Amino acid sequence: MSTNNQAGLVIVPEAVCQQVIDRPSAFTAVESVFAAMARGDAYNFPVIREAIGYADALYGFKSGFDRAGMALGVKSGGYWPGNADQGLTNHQSTIFLFDPDTGKLTALVGGNYLTAVRTAASSAVSIAHLARQDAKVLGIIGAGHQASFQLRAAVEQRQFEKIVAWNKSPERLASLAAVAADLGLPFESLEREEVAAQSDVIITITSAKEALLLNDWIRPGTHIACMGTDTRGKQEVDSALFSTATVYTDEVAQSVSIGEAQHAVVEGLVAHKDITPLGDVINGDHGGRNFAEEITLFDGTGVGLQDLAVASTAVELAVEQGLATSIAL
Ligand code: NAD
């Protein structure tokens, strides 16, 4: 949505984003923008992500234009591995929104919390549209910063009765166990193969560079949301799974280049035409899950338009609730 009716530059800090954006509003923003992308109403521009040769940092931009939501802008930021030692989040980002009619900068929005909620909303939208209705066990592979957000958003989509999880360093699973306890759900820490054996829905959210889940381990009827692979070289699941599963994504161009599908494409196991934008399912142009035993895989690569969508909603709500600061530019 356009912010061009606001005087000056609207600033929405991190703390205000946390106050105004809840999971349902992030879900709606992400679902709408996936639908707009599939209709051809919204475009992501090519992603830039570079090692800057300083502080071991990765820095880049994700940008796009949503003609339906009138959101034009860019998320700028990246990954600074040394930040944790200074008490800061390693991932740092800021979202800039521009008036699509004039190009004027209209809003500056904290992007750290919004990145987590929009990423969790992405897998949640995939679960809402692709998982079996009778899914009972949710598996999580990974227990980093994003994992708790993923868990909270996912459990709102089906009547899950149990959470099972694995992480490379098992002690980090304590944070997920605490979220499960808060949600009143039993939690079990398991080996990867056992997570696959028990789960109806699996979310992978790691920085792994090799397959953590093998094709043979995945039960018929499982929905897998691969959320960690957003860069060339990362990998979370067996590329053979792309031959077994019906594959969906947020954006095909990203899926095949920087997403989970990158390896299967190189190995000739999947082609661009075999990957369906989730927006097609949301728009009713694709039927989604065909049968109970089908394995569905969502390759959630993370697109700039998701950031612009949640940032636009944050601006609108912050202004409405008198929580935004406005300055002349
Ligand atoms: P984090 O640094 O807080 O946690 C990293 C997680 O990956 C931990 O669970 C860690 O144990 C695990 N891990 C690291 N190396 C591993 C390996 N070799 N094998 C198995 N597990 C390994 O990161 P985070 O903020 O939780 O993000 C997790 C991943 O999600 C990152 O790769 C990040 O780039 C990606 N991400 C994707 C999106 C998207 O939209 N798709 C958005 C944000 C983050």
Image (cartoon, rainbow, N blue to C red):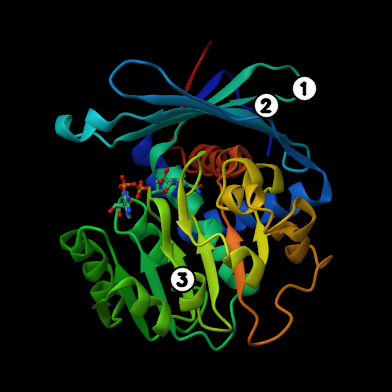
Please state if 210 lies on the left or on the right of 245 as rendered.
left
Q: CA distance from mark 2 to mark 3?
A: 41 Å
Asked if disc 1 and disc 2 are in contact, CB closer than 8 Å, the reply is yes
Mark 3: few, some, or many residues within 10 Å (few <14, many ≥20)?
many
The residue at label 2 has a CB less than 8 Å from ligand 1: no
Residue at 23% over, 70% down: 177
Q: Quadrant of residue 90?
A: top left
Q: CA distance from mark 1 to mark 3?
A: 42 Å
Position above or below: 101 against 24: above
Residue at 76% over, 60% down: 274
Q: CA distance from mark 1 to mark 2?
A: 8 Å
Quarter of the N terminus within the rendering: top right
Residue 202 is labelled as 3
- Tell me which amino acid carries mark 2: Asn
- Tell me which amino acid carries mark 3: Ile
Residue 4 is labelled as 2
Is any atom of residue 245 visible in this view? no
SS at mark 2?
loop
Q: Earlier in the sequence, mark 1 or mark 3?
A: 1
Q: Earlier in the sequence, mark 1 or mark 2?
A: 2
Is any atom of residue 53 visible in this view? yes
Q: Which residue is mark 1?
A: 101
Mark 2: few, some, or many residues within 10 Å (few <14, many ≥20)?
many
Q: Residue furthest top?
A: 329
The x, y position of residue 264, in whole percent, is: 61, 54
Q: Quadrant of residue 9?
A: top right
SS at mark 3?
strand
Q: Residue furthest front?
A: 267
Q: Quadrant of residue 140?
A: bottom left
Closer-to-camera residue (167/92): 167
